[in-house]
Image (tube, rainbow, N blue to C red):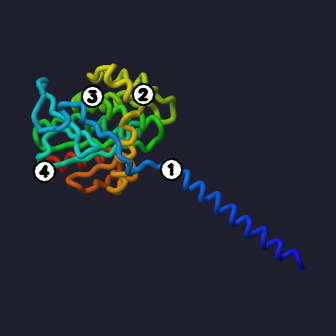
Amino acid sequence: MKTKPRNGLVALAVVVVLAIVVGVGVAVQASRDTTGNDGATPGGSSSSSTPDGSTTGNGAVQAGLAEKYGLGVGDPNAPVKVEIFEDFLCPYCGQLEAISHEKLQQAAADGKVYVVYRPMAFLGDYSTRAFNAFGVVLDEAGGEAALRFHNELYADQPSEGGAMPDDDWLVRKAVAAGADEAAVRKGIEDGSFQQWTVNANDDASRRGVNSTPTVFVNGESVSATSIEDLDTQVMQRIQNGS
């Protein structure tokens, strides 16, 4: 007769302990989540942070910070706007970059499209470090260097399942893209734009982005059956001016 009350008390105690553990876990997670916190935005150190559609001295289309979290390439007033949400470690993003980059750059040079590259950090530590380094290059060396850095990260993209490049590798890529090592090394090693990457992820999530690559054309998400189909649809819409 005394067993039931005792079992009931034990069960209640277990529930209370579990509730405390869950509560502590939620509190710890909340303390780690910095989404929405203020953070530095690239562009403060660069004299070419805003694209105006003009060309640089070497004929390249001007590029610069776009809408706080992206790199805009071309004329913001072009009839078509293409936004590419991407992760520097995502192999499918690498495939899209390989088949679309030259065509997009030419279309931007022709005034047909304004391309906004929107890096994200979906796939772990390297994604975050590469995205932060992208922000450092954009801030310290300007839009054209950031675009070259973007291109180099894809041209030499690591395997998702292999060893990840270290910060020295990112610094070398930044210097190859035209940045000064002394200007970018500390920011790359210290993660000076890490909060910016967190907030960029949150902004993309609010847009409904939950995978990479995700592409919007004039604000409309493009559905495709393959990377090749995605490229075809995007280029068709650029040619059609819509």
Neighbour tally class for label 3: few under 14, some 14-19, many 20 plus, Cα within 10 Å: many
Residue to which mark 4 is pinned = 241
Neighbour tally class for label 2: few under 14, some 14-19, many 20 plus, Cα within 10 Å: some
Q: Residue 129 in the image: x percent, y percent?
A: 42, 34
Q: Which of 146 and 68 is in front in this view?
A: 68
Neighbour tally class for label 4: few under 14, some 14-19, many 20 plus, Cα within 10 Å: some
Residue to which mark 1 is pinned = 31
Whole-number angstrom distance, CA of label 1 to CA of label 3: 31 Å
Whole-number angstrom distance, CA of label 2 to CA of label 3: 14 Å
Q: Is mark 2 on a helix, strand or loop?
A: helix
Image quarter where the N terminus lies is: bottom right
Q: Which of 162 and 172 is in front in this view?
A: 172
The mark nearer the N terminus, 1 or 4, is 1
Whole-number angstrom distance, CA of label 2 to CA of label 1: 23 Å
Q: Residue 92 in the image: x percent, y percent?
A: 38, 41
Q: Residue shown at 45%/42% (left/top)?
A: 123
Q: Which of 203 and 229 is in front in this view?
A: 203
